[in-house]
Image (spheres, rainbow, N blue to C red):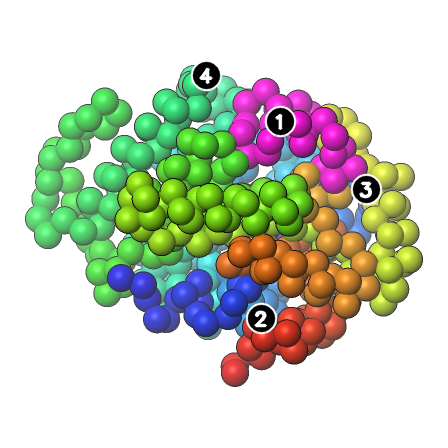
């Protein structure tokens, strides 16, 4: 049952949200002094700005250790369930996701925390399920990162099945499988109205995408270009229907450098992502993702060092407002139902995006004006 009160299910053709503002540096691996510092006050101001502008969602990265370098990229981060709960209490319409590592939190604890946050937000919580890839974080918890991707997703499936059972079971229940043993499990309250919040999973591997097709409302996946992105959308919507009789929405992620002229945007991108890149942190991020993650195609990792410095390796939108709007329109034309955006400094740059890019998307019929 889809919740009418949750912005992830509104009528906008292209839904938009902000990615990773809970982490220092955001998505930009740079040493520039204006880089994102991810304080609570800044996150709250950003969330309220995005809410007033009609953006659909806020999506955090669950990070437990940074990537080193001069800035210790993402070394400071606000824990995502707590972060989401605080923001839900002080916003009105926007969906706030909690990103949860299945390996690091017991499903009954997560079920209770998430249900509580959902009540605080009046049904505006979202859940982004992460099945794990970052070996140093597993080491920090004295856990073993399984070498094979399928084992991580088998564990994640058990975790999600147990969370959902806790949310839906009318009476205490027992649970015994290869990963969890529960006696007289329960979760009260259930999420608002007995409905499951919108569920998302990020992945580019077949296992990750299959997990989303089986369980989620949205697959959040990296796009290399719009042609291959359109194929991904077509393939995985078809697979979700054929395998699981489910409709699956597909979202992608971008980073934005938007300035009054294209030349200014390119110049700033060169400044922060090349001249002032945090090189050791970029190298560590790329190395770890190449060894342990399948969120990015392997051939993409080595080829896009500047994009990793510019925005964690995701799709760049660099130009004047018309060019950025054109890029987002191409993403919509490829079949994506939404995209996240990130900036070097979210609070400094989002107002210009709201003022200059959103109206162009509204003119194209991809979005309605806030409150419309």
Q: Which mark is residue 298?
A: 1
CA–CA distance in space, label 1 to label 2: 32 Å
Q: Is residue 357 visible?
A: yes
Closest to the camera, between mark 1 and mark 4, is 1
Asked whether 243 or 359 is in front, the reply is: 243
Dots 1, 4 in contact, CB < 8 A = no
Judge whether residue 367 is colored magenta. Answer: no
Asked whether 210 or 192 is in front, the reply is: 210
Q: Upstream in the sequence, badge 3 or badge 2? A: 3
Residue 297 quadrant:
top right
CA–CA distance in space, label 3 to label 2: 30 Å
Q: Residue furthest left?
A: 171
Residue at 73% of width from left, 54% of height from top?
Answer: 317
Task: Find numbered disc 3 in the image and state the secondary structure of the residue it sits on.
Answer: helix
Category of crowding for the residue at label 1, using alpha-carbon neighbours closer than 10 angstroms: few (below 14), some (14–19), many (at least 20) = few
Q: Is residue 50 left or right of residue 167?
A: right
Task: Identify residue for label 3.
Answer: 273
Q: Is residue 177 left or right of residue 242?
A: left
Category of crowding for the residue at label 3, using alpha-carbon neighbours closer than 10 angstroms: few (below 14), some (14–19), many (at least 20) = many
Where is residue 320? Give x, y as percent: 81, 64
Task: Find numbered disc 2 in the image and state the secondary structure of the residue it sits on.
Answer: loop
The magenta stretch is 284-308
Task: Identify residue for label 2.
Answer: 366
Q: Is residue 125 left or right of residue 133?
A: left
Task: Find numbered disc 4 in the image and state the secondary structure of the residue it sits on.
Answer: loop
Task: Identify residue for label 4.
Answer: 147
CA–CA distance in space, label 2 to label 4: 42 Å
Residue 74 quadrant:
top right
Where is residue 113? Give x, y as percent: 33, 49
């Amino acid at each position: 049952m889809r919740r009418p009160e949750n912005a992830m299910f509104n009528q906008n053709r292209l839904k938009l949200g902000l990615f990773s503002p809970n982490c220092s540096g955001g998505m930009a691996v740079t040493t520039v002094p204006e880089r994102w510092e991810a304080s609570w006050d800044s996150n709250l101001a950003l969330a309220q700005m995005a809410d007033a502008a009609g953006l659909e969602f806020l999506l955090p990265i669950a990070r437990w250790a940074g990537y080193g370098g001069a800035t210790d990229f993402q070394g400071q981060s606000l824990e995502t369930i707590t972060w989401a709960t605080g923001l839900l209490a002080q916003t009105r319409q926007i969906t706030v996701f909690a990103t949860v590592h299945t390996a690091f939190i017991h499903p009954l604890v997560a079920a209770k925390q998430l249900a509580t946050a959902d009540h605080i937000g009046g049904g505006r919580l979202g859940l982004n399920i992460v099945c794990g890839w970052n070996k140093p974080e597993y080491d920090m918890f004295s856990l073993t990162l399984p070498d094979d991707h399928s084992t991580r997703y088998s564990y994640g499936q058990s975790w999600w099945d147990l969370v959902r059972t806790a949310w839906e079971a009318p009476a205490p229940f027992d649970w015994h499988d290869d990963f969890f043993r529960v006696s007289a499990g329960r979760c009260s309250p259930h999420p608002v109205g007995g409905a499951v919040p919108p569920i998302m999973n990020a992945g580019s591997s077949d296992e990750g995408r299959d997990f989303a097709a089986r369980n989620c409302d949205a697959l959040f996946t990296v796009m290399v270009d719009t042609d291959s992105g359109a194929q991904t959308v077509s393939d995985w919507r078809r697979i979700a229907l054929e395998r699981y009789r489910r409709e699956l929405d597909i979202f992608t992620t971008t980073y934005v450098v938007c300035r009054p002229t294209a030349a200014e945007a390119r110049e700033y991108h060169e400044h922060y992502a090349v001249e002032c890149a945090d090189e050791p942190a970029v190298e560590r991020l790329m190395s770890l993702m190449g060894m342990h993650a399948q969120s990015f195609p392997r051939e993409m990792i080595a080829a896009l060092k500047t994009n990793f410095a510019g925005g964690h390796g995701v799709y760049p939108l660099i130009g004047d407002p018309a060019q950025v709007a054109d890029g987002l329109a191409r993403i919509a034309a490829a079949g994506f139902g939404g995209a996240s955006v990130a900036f070097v400094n979210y609070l400094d740059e989002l107002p210009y995006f709201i003022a200059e890019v959103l109206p162009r998307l509204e003119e194209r019929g991809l979005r309605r004006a806030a409150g419309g």
